[in-house]
Amino acid sequence: MTPIRILGVAFAALVSMVLLSGCGSTPRATNLQVNLTLNEQLAQSGRVPSIEVDVIGLNQSQLETFRTVNLSEYFLSSLRRDTNKKTFYFASGNTEPKSLARTDGVWKEWIDDQGAMYLAVLADIPGVTQDLPGEADPRRLILPLDRSRWSGTRVDIRVDGSGLTLLTPPKPAAD
């Protein structure tokens, strides 16, 4: 083999390694079908309090704010008013499941325009006022949008009288 041919093969190998090393290493966000269902016993009780659930796409710089915000204050704040969110309501006579479609235009805003890699689900449930940080507060879920963390494209969340229950958890993060 001539030195030029050896250099050409080495260069091609180097380019291939660089291109292949980037594949799969950068997390990519995915839009999910988010399904919210009211706890069946609560729904059938006929005494459903007025519950609001905000679903919010978050980028890295917003993550800490929404992880630590006092939820009792959030639902009365300008932060909530100024946040690009989808809000769903449950109450007596309005107990049917709610859904944020994968095709909803808000996903483009969150992922493409804002660079969202997380999804916050925050619930205002009357009588639940623990105001704990992070997911210690049962009214708050912070979910990854990294497509490698999900087996499918839907997330099911049950809204209970005491908080939110994630029924389809993501896969563990790869190390």
Image: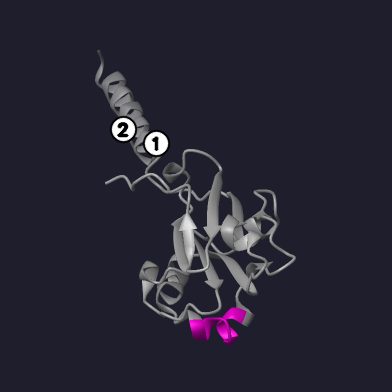
- The answer to which of marks 2 and 1 sits earlier in the sequence is 2
Q: CA distance from mark 2 to mark 1?
A: 9 Å
Label 2 sits on residue: 14
The quadrant in which residue 126 appears is bottom right
The quadrant in which residue 76 appears is bottom right
Indicate the amino acid at tag 2: Leu
Q: Secondary structure at mark 2?
A: helix
Circle on res. 154: none
Residue 171, visible in the rendered structure: yes
Is residue 9 left or right of 141 when viewed as pictured? left
Q: Position of residue 24 (x, y in %)?
A: 40, 40
**Please, is residue 43 above or below residue 62 in the view?**
above
Residue 113 lies in the magenta-colored region: no
In the image, 131 versus 144, the foreground residue is: 131
Q: Residue furthest top?
A: 1
**Please, is residue 13 above or below residue 68 in the view?**
above
Within 10 Å of disc 2 (Cα), the crowding (few <14, some 14-19, many 20+) is: few
Q: Position of residue 83 (x, y in %)?
A: 60, 75
Label 1 sits on residue: 19
